[in-house]
Image: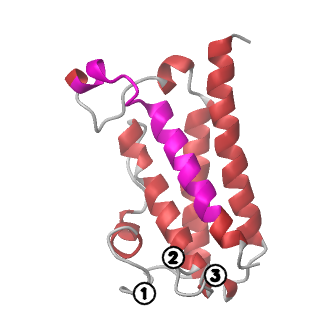
Amino acid sequence: MTNEEILGVTVFNLWRLVINRFNKTLSELSDEQLQQQAAPGRNRVFYLLGHLTAMHDRMFPLLGIGERLHTELDEPYILNPDRVLADPLSATELRRAWTEVNDKLTRAFEGFTLEDWLQKHTAVSEEDFIKDPMRNRLAVVMNRTSHASYHAGQAALTK
């Protein structure tokens, strides 16, 4: 395996590790426990799950790998704080959406070559990408992996 291949596999393996850890936490929490706040005065685990699902769903067009699956999650889980709007999905439906989005992303990432990882994401112009090639798919996935890890840690505190 070349150093370049190792880089892509490392990012992919970290993505899977973080997603699997969050999946484990979710599997240990009842639907009622999802309604608990991560800490007093903080977001509910349900909101964190909706937020991460929506953020990951936004990666499909951002990475140029497909259309979004759950645009209905933006308003309650990205554009508004927790408890401002009613939850549009039940706990079962939200868990299913989380799995659907991340399974589809993971399947796409499995097929990425180093060249695929280093392609520009769709929110940057060709001109700006030439100036700053760090605005690539790899950077997006690394950022989202870190984001998911942070919220997974918050969710784990409720167990």
* Residue at the image position 64 percent from the left and 43 percent from the top: 15
Residue at point 42%, 62% (across, down): 70
Q: Amino acid at mark 3?
A: Leu
Q: Which residue is mark 2?
A: 47
Horizontal relation, residue 148 to residue 71: left or right:
right
Taking depth in this image into account, of 77 and 133 the one nearest to the observer is 133
Q: Nearer the viewer, residue 79 or 101?
A: 79
Q: Who's the residue at 67% across and 89% down the image?
A: 32
Examine the structure image and report whether residue 149 is included in the region drawn in magenta. Answer: yes
Q: Quadrant of residue 72?
A: bottom left
Give yes or no for contact between labels 2 and 1 (Cβ–Cβ under 8 Å): yes
Image location (x, y in percent) of residue 67? 38, 48
Residue 39 shown in magenta: no
Crowd class of label 2 (few under 14; some 14 to 19; many from 20; radius 10 Å): many
Q: Residue at x 70, y 37 (%)?
A: 13
Residue flagged by tag 2: what amino acid is it?
Tyr
The amino acid beneath tag 1 is Arg
Q: State yes or no: discs 2 and 3 in contact (Cβ < 8 Å).
A: no
Occupied quadrant, residue 24:
bottom right
Is 156 rendered above or below residue 11? below
Of pointers 1 and 3, the one earlier in the residue sequence: 3
List the residue tagged with mark 1: 83
Q: Considering the numbered disc 1 on the image, is that residue within a helix, a strand or a loop?
A: loop
Quadrant where the N terminus lies? top right
Q: Which residues are magenta?
A: 128-152
Q: Which residue sits furthest front?
A: 40
Q: Earlier in the sequence, mark 2 or mark 3?
A: 3
Residue that badge 3 annotates: 34
- Quarter of the picture containing the C terminus is bottom right
Number of callouts: 3
Give percent across and percent down for residue 40. 58, 87
